[in-house]
Image (cartoon, grey):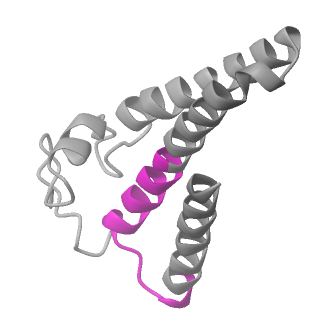
Amino acid sequence: MTVLCRIMEFIEAGRSQGMNDRGKDRMRPRDGINRRKKLYLTLVAVGFSAMAILAFAEKYLPVAFFKTLLYGAISLFLAGNILMYIGIRCPKCKATLGYHIVFSAGKADQCPRCRINFDEDMS
Ligand SMILES: [Zn+2]
């Protein structure tokens, strides 16, 4: 169950990160974007791990129960993926940023539409 341990660590890390953010008195657009990205990545990771675990557990589970769990895991995985693309939005112009953010691997520092800088304070 090392995969599950990884997920727990990942979730814990996200939680303490959130607490640190709350301690600051200024809010950058990037903080909100990163929090959403982390949340959706967690959904994808949990869904994917559940599918992987189910693949091994299939022969030990009753068919109906297995199917229910499998559909749940697939839905979680797909929902996380879809939300990653449509759920991350520019705090200013509301443009969908998912594709831009995910594929620029954290280097994205401005909105491709309105050019707001994600590291500057929101006014
Ligand atoms: Zn924008």
Q: Is residue 1 left or right of residue 96?
A: right
Magenta stretch, main secondary structure, is: helix
Quadrant where the N terminus is found in the figure: bottom right
Q: Nearer the viewer, residue 23 or 80?
A: 80
Q: Residue at x 62, y 63 (%)?
A: 5
Q: Is residue 31 rendered magenta in the image? A: yes
Q: Is residue 4 left or right of residue 29?
A: right
Q: Residue at x 17, y 49 (%)?
A: 111
Q: Residue at x 21, y 59 (%)?
A: 106
Give the number of marks.
0
From which residue to which does the magenta span run? 22-41
- Give the quarter of the image for residue 50: top right
Q: Nearer the viewer, residue 110 or 13?
A: 13
- Give the quarter of the image for residue 59: top right
Q: Residue at x 29, y 75 (%)?
A: 121
The spot of residue 6 in percent (x, y) is: 55, 62
Vertical placement of residue 27 versus 116, above or below? below
Q: Is residue 97 left or right of residue 2?
A: left
Q: Is residue 2 rendered magenta in the image? A: no
Vertical placement of residue 62 versus 117, above or below? above
Vertical placement of residue 37 versus 53, above or below? below
Q: Nearer the viewer, residue 118 or 76?
A: 76
The spot of residue 16 in percent (x, y) is: 58, 80
Q: Is residue 72 left or right of residue 88?
A: right
Quadrant where the C terminus is found in the figure: bottom left
The spot of residue 17 in percent (x, y) is: 51, 78
